[in-house]
Image (cartoon, rainbow, N blue to C red):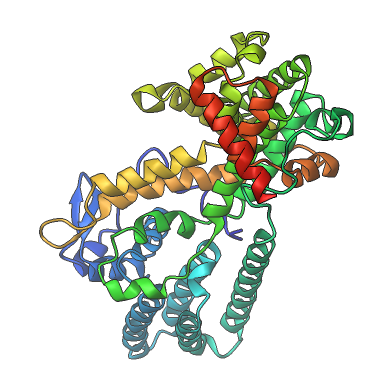
Amino acid sequence: MPQTPIFSSMLGSSCSGQVQPDMGERCVDPVYQDGNLVSGSLEALIERLVPTMDYYPDRTYIFTFLLSSRVFIHPHELLAKVGQICIKQKQQLETGTEAEKLKSFAAKIIQLLKEWTETFPYDFQDEKSMKELKEIAHRITQCDEENGTVKKIISQMTQNLLMALSARSQYQEIREKFRQPVSDKGTILKTKPQSTQKDILSVCCDPLILAQQLTYIELERVSNIYPEDLMQIVSHMDSLDNHKCRGDVTKTYNLEAYDNWFNCLSMLVATEICRVVKKKQRTRMVEFFIDVARECFNIGNFNSMMAIISGMNLSPVARLKKTWSKVKTAKFDVLEHHMDPSSNFCNYRTALQGAAQRSQTANSNREKIVIPVFNLFIKDIYFLHKIHTNRLPNGQINFKKFWEISRQIHDFLTWKQVECPFEKDKKIQSYLLTAPIYSEEALFIASFESEGPENHMEKDSWKTLRTTLLNRA
């Protein structure tokens, strides 16, 4: 995580991007509307990123430009251009006699690099970027060779960067061991007595506690999603200006891993319901998950809530009419109302906004929790990308678009930094993360065994599925 609190002050109600008066003289092509930067050439935007003796870019601009720049230029190429500008400014300052100005300039360049490495450490994963970083650092070190302060700061910055890259690499290795979203293991005609099968209720029968453990898992996984991961939605679609760049972009898997978690939870819910033999117990299981989803909503964990609802709406579960006839559905109806997709999920967005406002004024981590429906969050960024062009007709970068995208991503980064207030229960989490889940075929078979097929279409499906799985076994 960033060592400097760059997110706390950035991207408030408006993204002004206002500049110091002298900056307007350096770059003639950026366009401003009401003091807000809305467009500019890549060269001018890069120049605006680099500090001078009398100027340092505000954090909203640093974050937004570094985030969006990867759409147009590789990080190592951007570092090279920043280095070139630094050399020119350093040479100009060296012609003078004031050594303090040179030290002040060096301090600002270090601060920029520090913010860059802390906020986007993965930009420095390849040798080219590290080489450019070291070259800039070497030149800046020469500005203060007497006391070695600059050298010490750069050394610490590099050490922190390597630690961040190592931690991320370790997480990706662990992620590879995560349960896959679908498993055919142990399938799954009900040949074992129900008493020998462990279910979620035997591990945790309190909806609130289960909702808290789900929230713990959500926050843990969300913490490993980085702003550059989210920007891949734009940079990996069709927006790179130079197509040769695409092969060099390192693919990360954090978005896919988090999406797989959603699918796993949905399938686990469906599995837990469908594999229960007795209708009374199955009814209890459905009502239990409804209560868990409700507690997730109250906590602000909308992603788990949506996953649970999605699991209960899968066809193998939804067709269990005899079971649903015994379920008290009033609470489920309320949940579905919150997740009604009409008007672009208007009800959910209202609830999300309420949770976000609560988070801003909260005094405890418990009240700060906001976990949006990740799939919808991703779609929002994608549509922002699709409805606005990256460049304007005059060739300038449409920076207004990237202000909006960075604002969305900033909100997510703020929410992901909340420390989970709930104590980890290893037993419950182990079950949630490793319990066998049925494939779609196995879910239908379990569903048909619980409540027989009601029409010719279902009967044909039932026969086909049973034959297919038995032959496969």
In the image, residue 332 lies at what x, y percent?
A: 59, 16
Q: Which residue is drawn at 76% across and 43% down?
A: 435
Q: Say if 446 sits above or below 136 in the image.
A: above
Q: Which residue is drawn at 58% across and 59% down?
A: 2
Q: Say if 300 sits above or below 381 in the image.
A: above
Q: Which residue is drawn at 36% across and 75% down?
A: 78
Q: Say if 208 sits above or below 143 in the image.
A: above
Q: Residue furthest right?
A: 195
Q: In this view, does 174 lie to the left or right of 237?
A: right
Indicate the quadrant where residue 438 lies: top right
Indicate the quadrant where residue 355 lies: top right
Q: Is residue 363 visible?
A: no
Q: Is residue 332 left or right of residue 338?
A: right
Total numbered badges shown on the rendered structure:
0
- Which of 134/460 is in front? 460
In the image, residue 111 lies at what x, y percent?
A: 50, 69
